[in-house]
Amino acid sequence: MQKVVKKRVNKKINLFNKRHEKFNRIFVPLIISFFLILISLAFLPFDNYFYANFSITGRGIVIPDFLSAIILFFQEDLLFGVLILLIGILIIRYKHKELNKLDRTKEKKEYSSFILSFFAVLIFSSLLKILIPRPRPEIIFGIESYPSNHSAVLFSIVPFIKSKKVKIFYISFAILIMLSRFLFGYHFISDLFAGAGVGLMISIFCKESHG
């Protein structure tokens, strides 16, 4: 009798743990992505104010050439896209480095899931740019501003990171890149929050449906 009761209790505990893990893996990031999009909408009426008063280009501040060259490197779309793909692949490899050869199928599946997620995020974000032809702060950079593709692809990696330390480090890196997009006139703040929300949301759907 005690064994039966213990078995039922363990079964309920395992079920609870699975549901809790699923909530943390799926619903928490989705809630965060919705929150980021709401922040984006809240910033829309104040974008011009923040750009004029807090961005480098908006205030007409001149920066050294060497620093400008480094920043421009990260703004180049193709180079940036390749960099993010490589970072994502390295993160997945790091996560699976302790698995044996019999588990490599799972690792390969996650690679394909990430690549699918990356391009799905990029396509969806680009379509939104066409549907919402909003000018960039500095018109010389084009009229497709909302949402930010850079922010979207940056946050497409987040659902694939398991380690908390790696996640904190990576999100800090992502925020720095996003901040540079604002400071140098490529995007308004609302563009960046929208991109982050879209990237996170689409990536979660792709990961879960493909995984």
Image (cartoon, helix red, strand yellow):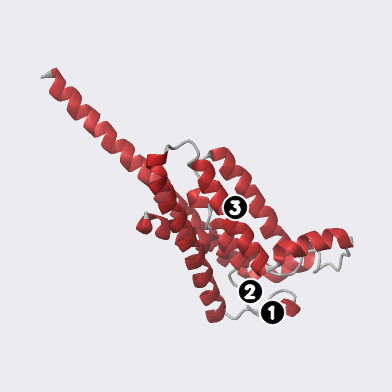
Figure check: 95 above or below 34: above
Identify the residue position indicated by label 2 in the image: 145
Instruction: Out of 207 and 21, give the one closest to the viewer.
Output: 207
The percent position of residue 198, horizontal first and vertical second, equals 51, 64
Separation (CA) of disc 2 from disc 1: 8 Å
Residue at image position (87%, 64%) is: 61
Residue 42 % position (x, y)? 58, 64
Residue drawn 44% across and 58% down?
Answer: 112
Can residue 34 be seen here? The reply is no
Q: Is residue 118 left or right of residue 22?
A: right
Which image quarter: residue 165?
Answer: top right
10 Å crowding of disc 2: few (<14), some (14-19), many (20+): many
| Viewer-side residue, 149 vs 108 | 108
Left or right, residue 76 beside residue 5: right
Q: Which residue is mark 1?
A: 142
Q: Which residue is mark 3?
A: 87
Q: Is residue 125 visible?
A: yes
- Viewer-closest of 114 and 147: 114
Label 3 SS: helix
**Of the residues tagged 3 and 2, which is closer to the observer?**
3
Quarter occupied by residue 210: bottom left
Residue depicted at 55% across the width and 53% down the height: 88
**Amino acid type of the residue tagged 1 in the rendering:** Gly
Secondary element at image label 1: loop
Q: What kind of residue is marked 3?
A: Ile
